[in-house]
């Protein structure tokens, strides 16, 4: 059966010149450089969508809006689509950028051993290949590299689901790098390789 990819750009974007999830989901540095997480997340998702369209992979953009859609609405839509396609044939990816004074990249799944674990492990491997000099933030206590959390979009989706955190937007060096065209392309490719591995499994 054909696989379905569900893409979820975390948080909101810019509407009529105003960033709709300010001030928490943005960061302004002393030199004026500003990063908006919702805008960055959408750049990654748009790159993924473009490639999946060219590759003929079936997908749905859960948000497809600059608005900050409530988490329940995102999950309800994802679950309706997953139920139609078959939960085991569907992959949900929520795309984010991190904050909180750290550095590196990481991926989350819901707690326990699930079908999401292999997907998350693949993502970490592909990010490590794309960014060999950057830190992969892992929790290997249960034998794999993903971190586990009861995030709403992970806990309540009926299909395999991961939440990616591609670098820290409040780390100046990472924020400057992650917004370059080269880094965006690499992050998109890591997501795509993860998707293709799921589709070919």
Image (spheres, rainbow, N blue to C red):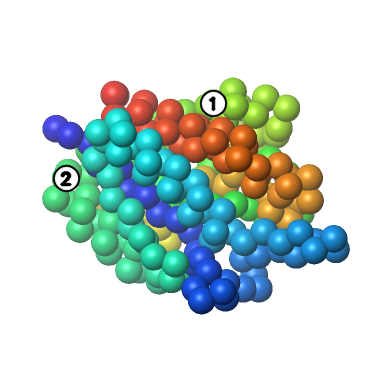
* Residue 30 position within the rendered picture, expressed as x and y whole percent measured from the top left: 85, 63
Task: Name the quadrant containing residue 25.
Answer: bottom right
Label 2 Cα crowd, 10 Å radius (few <14 / some 14-19 / many 20+): some
Give the structural element (helix, strand or loop) at label 2. helix
Task: Name the quadrant containing residue 19.
Answer: bottom right
Q: Nearer the viewer, residue 54 or 155?
A: 54
* Residue 18 in view here: yes
Task: Indicate the quadrant containing the C terminus: top left, top right, bottom left or bottom right.
Answer: top left
Contact (CB < 8 A) between labels 2 and 1? no
Task: Indicate the quadrant containing the N terminus: top left, top right, bottom left or bottom right.
Answer: top left
Task: Name the quadrant containing residue 58.
Answer: top left
In this rendering, is residue 184 above or below 121? below
Instruction: Give the residue pinned by disc 1.
Output: 125
Instruction: Give the residue pinned by disc 2.
Output: 85
Q: Nearer the viewer, residue 86 or 52?
A: 52
Q: Report the number of discs.
A: 2
Marks 2/1: CA–CA distance: 28 Å
Give the structural element (helix, strand or loop) at label 1. helix
- Going from the N terminus, do you reach mark 2 or mark 1 first? 2
Q: Nearer the viewer, residue 62 or 141?
A: 62
* Residue 27 position within the rendered picture, expressed as x and y whole percent measured from the top left: 71, 63
Residue lying at 17% horizontally and 34% vertically, measured from the top left: 2
Q: Nearer the viewer, residue 110 or 126?
A: 126
In this rendering, is residue 132 above or below 62? above
Residue lying at 31% horizontally and 34% vertically, measured from the top left: 54
* Residue 106 in view here: no
Q: Is residue 63 left or right of residue 183?
A: left
């Amino acid at each position: 059966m054909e696989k379905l990819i569900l893409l979820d750009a975390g948080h909101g974007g810019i509407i009529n010149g105003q960033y709709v999830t300010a001030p928490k989901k943005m960061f302004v540095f002393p030199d004026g450089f500003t990063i908006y997480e919702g805008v960055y997340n959408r750049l990654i998702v748009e790159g993924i969508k473009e490639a999946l369209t060219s590759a003929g992979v079936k997908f749905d953009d859960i948000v497809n809006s600059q608005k900050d859609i409530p988490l329940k609405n995102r999950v309800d839509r994802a679950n309706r689509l997953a139920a139609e396609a078959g939960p085991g044939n569907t992959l949900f990816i929520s795309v984010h950028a991190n904050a909180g004074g750290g550095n590196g990249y990481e991926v989350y799944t819901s707690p326990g051993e699930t079908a999401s674990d292999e997907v998350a492990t693949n993502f970490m491997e592909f990010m490590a290949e794309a960014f060999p000099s950057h830190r992969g933030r892992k929790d290997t206590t249960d034998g794999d590299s993903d971190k586990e959390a009861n995030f709403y979009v992970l806990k309540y989706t009926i299909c395999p689901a991961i939440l990616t955190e591609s670098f820290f937007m409040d780390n100046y060096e990472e924020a400057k790098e992650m917004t370059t065209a080269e880094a965006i392309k690499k992050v998109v490719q890591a997501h795509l390789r993860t998707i293709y591995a799921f589709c070919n499994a």
